[in-house]
Amino acid sequence: MASAPEPSHCKVILAGNIAKSLQNEVQEGVKKLERAPLLVGFLATDDAASRVYADWTGKTCRDNGFDFELREVTKDDIEEGIMSANTDDKVDGIIVYYPIHGNRQDQYLQQIVDIGKDVEGLSHKYIFNMYQNIRFLDDAKQRKSILPCTPLAVIKILEYLHVYNPILPYGNRLHGHTVTIINRSEVVGRPLAALLANDGANVYSVDIDNVEQFHRGEGLRKRRHTVDEKGGWTIEHCLPLSDVVISGVPGDKYKVPVKLLRNGAVCINFSSEKNFTPEVKEKASIYVPAIGKVTIIVLLRNLLVSACTK
């Protein structure tokens, strides 16, 4: 008779539970502001996922004391719509549901959103600050630089899980951690690698072609991260070294090779698909299967920052 399998000691943490702690912070901020900040969303696509995200944004806004207005426009009118919202004093934040044109034109649209209303952190100034490890817009350090929502959501999850060490100085609180990120998109993977490395982590960024290492050098001597290509490395080199593994590969065919995971690793999935098989619970100490609810609360947090600095 076969012996019963050992019970899993992995703790599965749902995004909704993490979002609640941030939700309280956001709701308290709205009360202090004594008005409902207005977020305007622009939908110029027939993409079903964009429609779902827009509806979800609106519901979350209203549930947390914010106002939301969805403006449906054509691809030809989106630029004029954004420019109009930029100059509308009633509008505190702008979100555009991409892709629209699906090319460099979308990058152009990201740059015409007024920086004071950019709640997605996609303006050139915000992107520059993020990669340069500049955390404020002003010398007095009163105005925080806005970070992209999905990378920031992952950071908030790692803080919630106490991966960040609050005893260490601010900016160094991931020192001693090795992280593998399986995704190097310009929207999530690369920004996330830079942010975690700027906070002190040793980060391996895994793409289909190669592995890059993001780090601040031995002893965190560098002010901002640098990137080294790890010639000949594959995911097989990275996973056994990593106490945190974050995956966001689109499509339902990719699965993280669980057998390579370090025992007790923290595993986070930000793909809309399941990048981890159920066996992840046999190796991981903590598993976060999705982050969407945290991402939307982070969006509201960014909106609150914009509204408070108007």
Image (cartoon, grey):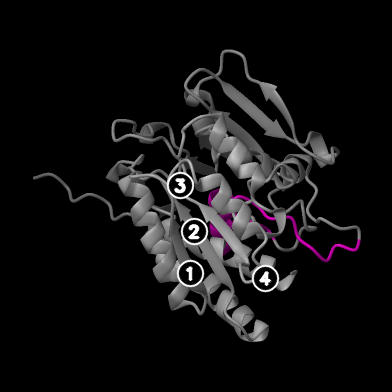
What is the span of residues highlighted in magenta in the rendered image?
Answer: 140-165
Instruction: Report which residue position mark 3 lands on.
Output: 267
Whole-percent x, y for residue 133 in the image? 78, 45
Q: Earlier in the sequence, mark 4 or mark 2?
A: 2
Mark linked to residue 307: 4
Q: Does residue 240 appear left or right of residue 133 in this picture? A: left
Q: Earlier in the sequence, mark 1 or mark 3?
A: 1
Rate crowding at label 4 as few (under 14), some (14 to 19) or many (20 or more) other CA atoms within 10 Å. many
Identify the mark at residue 163; answer none if there is no mark: none
Tag 1 residue: 68
Magenta stretch: residue 143 in it?
A: yes
Which amino acid, by three-letter code, is at mark 4? Ala
309 relative to 149, above or below: below
Q: Quadrant of the C terminus?
A: bottom right
Q: Residues within 10 Å of mark 2 (few under 14, many from 20)?
A: many
Of the two numbered discs 4 and 2 in the rendering, the one whose residue sits closer to the viewer: 2
What distance separates the C-alpha of mark 4 from that of mark 1? 13 Å
Where residue 254 sits, quadrant-wise, is top left
Q: Residues within 10 Å of mark 1 (few under 14, many from 20)?
A: many
Q: Position of residue 61 (x, y in %)?
A: 47, 71
Q: Total label count?
A: 4
- Work out how far the residue at label 1 is from the one at label 2, CA to CA, in angstroms: 7 Å
Dot in front, 2 or 3: 2
On the image, the x and y values in percent for residue 219 come to 82, 40
Q: Secondary structure at mark 2?
A: strand
Furthest toward the right, the residue is 139
